[in-house]
Image: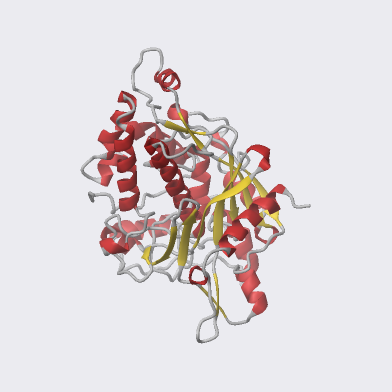
Amino acid sequence: MKTDADAIASTVLEEFNKLPAKRKPCVRDNGLHEWVPLSGIVAKGPGDSLKCLALATGMKCLPASKIPHARGVAVHDWHAEVLAIRAFNHFVLEECRQLALGIKPSQFLRRRSTPEIAAQKGESGTRESWHGQPYAWKEDVTLHMYCSEAPCGDASMELIMAAQDDASPWDVPTSLAETDCEVQAAQRSLPGRAYFSQLGVVRRKPARGDAPPSMSKSCSDKIALKQCTSLLSSLTALLVSPEGVYLESLILPASQFSAVACCRSFSTEGRMSSMTSRHWAGGYSFVPFRVETTTEEFHSSKRAVAARSDKTSASNLAVAWSSHGLDEGLVGGVLQGRKQFDLKGASRLSRRRTWSLAVEISRLCSDHSDEDAMIHGPLAAQTYKKVKESELLRDRCRVKRDVREHALTGWLRNTGDEDFGL
């Protein structure tokens, strides 16, 4: 009989297996067998029903030098875990759109009542803590994440050390002449795999010291932060209350699980200890997940592929899928076959197209109530940066600031792609 962890993993794996061959790792003409990490978000509903809402593969990110050229078109980070969360947000936004259009009821979201929204304003009726999203996650649906590999960063450090022929910490490159001063400083204070002796710290991607400098934080760090901000992105959080949109469990293959590393990375016994029982305004809380293991193995994992061939290579292709019809292949953060920063190459998960979808939904919602109408103004701001600086996102910003100051210290923002408009 399968455990819950096995059943959740199987749900993601079965959905991935349905994808066409063009979305999967292949055997190259030169005989190299490709491998790739896989992640997925699963909803568990009444009667223990399981449904994969979103999944993704991928393992790369944009170098810091290319961020200013992205213009909201290129996805910055397409590691499987991060891309799966972006695909989940796309799923949630599509659910909002269908509800706003009155197409059909949702298994996962519900319309919030006016009294429920009003109760969040406080006795004075002020908007010092806004919590007026028109939609909420249904209370009887929990969320779970499967990852075929240990998330990069702190949760995988013991595994990385054990896999090295020489367990000495990698050195940080001494020459960073091709990067600007800000990135140079970041590289010295935000290690990749360098300095194994530093555990519990925020790390960057990619991990190798000889890779182009990046400011993207590790998957371990981003998933740890999601225990406080919820799985919702900032744009989705303008439409859906964060309450209940938190992971209940993280599922890893047994071979990719280090109890010490996961405890240190995610739990109140590790670096998140200062977040214990924390609650913030706006419906935000620290909601730690449990980490469980599965005996299920992804057919295209590095281990599985290596067992079949001694000629292996990481796949350059990332894939994003959701049960709302999202089905994309990405290379370099844009749609496969497109130039990297061409507008026509923008993924539906890009900042630009996600923002556009959120604006469309806010217009549809504006006819329902004054509370809904006030969401459209911030979303229709002149630039993406103005949207993120909206007063309606102030509580979310406080959460992120608190976590970065007291738990995930050393977090440096990946800036340079905010001043674009639709």
Q: Estimate the x, y position of residue 24 in percent, counting from the top left.
A: 52, 69
Specify how the rendered protein is coloured: secondary structure
Is residue 215 rendered to the left or right of residue 420?
right
Q: Quadrant of residue 196?
A: bottom right
Q: Does 185 sit above or below residue 22?
A: above
Q: Based on the displayed image, in which of its 4 quarters is residue 416 positioned?
A: bottom left
Q: At 45% across and 43% down in the image, what residue appears? A: 92
Question: In this image, 79 relative to 368: left or right?
Answer: right
Whether residue 198 is visible, yes or no, is: no
Residue at image x 42%, y 23%?
A: 117
Q: Quadrant of residue 267?
A: top right
Percent from the top left, x then y, of residue 113? 44, 23
Q: Return the x and y of residue 297 as percentages of the image width and height.
A: 67, 63
The single residue placed furthest to the bottom in the displayed view is: 30
Q: In the rendered image of this protein, does residue 125 appear above or below residue 72?
A: above
Q: Is residue 416 above or below residue 305?
A: above
For this orientation, the residue located farthest to the top is 123
Residue 88, given in percent of the width and then of the height, sits at 48, 48
Q: Is residue 373 visible?
A: yes
